[in-house]
Image (spheres, helix red, strand yellow):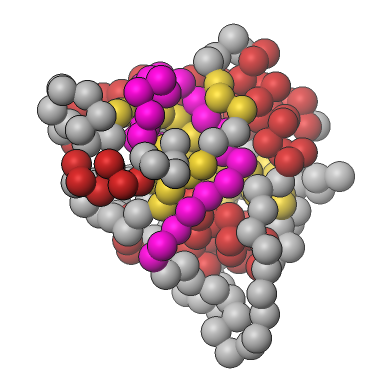
Amino acid sequence: MITRLGIIGGSGLSRSNVFRTSEESEVDTPHGPPSSAVETGERVAFLARHGADHQIPPHRINHRANLWALKEAGASAVVGSCSVGSLQAEIAPGNLVVPDDYVSFWEIPTYFDDQVQHITPTLDPGLRQQLVRAAKTRSVPVRDGGVYVQTRGPRLETKAEVRVLRKFGDIVGMTMATEATLAQELDLRYASLCSVDNYSHGITKEPLTFEDICRTQEANARVVQGVLQTFVEAAA
């Protein structure tokens, strides 16, 4: 039973009006301030991962504060919307992916700096299937499952790195593995709705530019909003 759903809006999804929130509150946490104010409604608490004006780069996001703030707002489950690059030719921009596993070779922050605690990383199966159903209800192309590879950022990956990463991953981004891990440390169920906004560097012959990614993000954000709206309505 979800008492309140936390939603972390990624690139292109920094406003929560689609979720009919009713109250905005500035929050401080033991880990510092979160990326944005938390907007809460009867069933939803929304937070913009990169800030309300998308001013926070991926390597400067205070993930510990973000997840803590959503739990303080009453969330028992969290869905993160994520902009990703495709590592596989068959996963085209414009598709959605609901990953079922992730990889991160870089350090992930923890709430257990001074304790010996271990979790087994898991993306919540129930939330995942609800997201997949919501996308299918909207007739949006969605991939059920896939491996998300998290890199450090803020730069994009080199062609050589992409050749390595695509051997065991399907999509690549800079935030989800951290969020999923911290959510579990707080006993929050977590799943992600990933918007494929570009092919990764070298997958196609077309040059990859940040400007092109931003244009695709803007178009895909409207699709993500609609799927999340359907997801929230079904969970109510």
User: Left or right of 156: which side holds 64?
Assistant: right
Residue 14 figure quarter:
top left
Q: Nearer the viewer, residue 8 or 141?
A: 141
* 49 up-or-down from 95: above or below: below
180 to the left or right of 215: right
Image quarter of the C terminus = top right
Q: Which residues are magenta?
A: 83-106
Q: Is residue 85 magenta?
A: yes
Residue 80 lies in the magenta-colored region:
no
The spot of residue 41 in percent (x, y) is 68, 42
**Residue 42 showing in the rendered view:** no
Q: Residue furthest right?
A: 1
Outermost residue on the left side: it is 207
Q: In the rendering, at what x and y percent does residue 155 appear? A: 21, 51
Residue at 75% across, 47% down: 4
In the image shown, does 116 or 234 lie closer to the viewer?
116
Rendered location of residue 190, percent (x, y): 65, 49
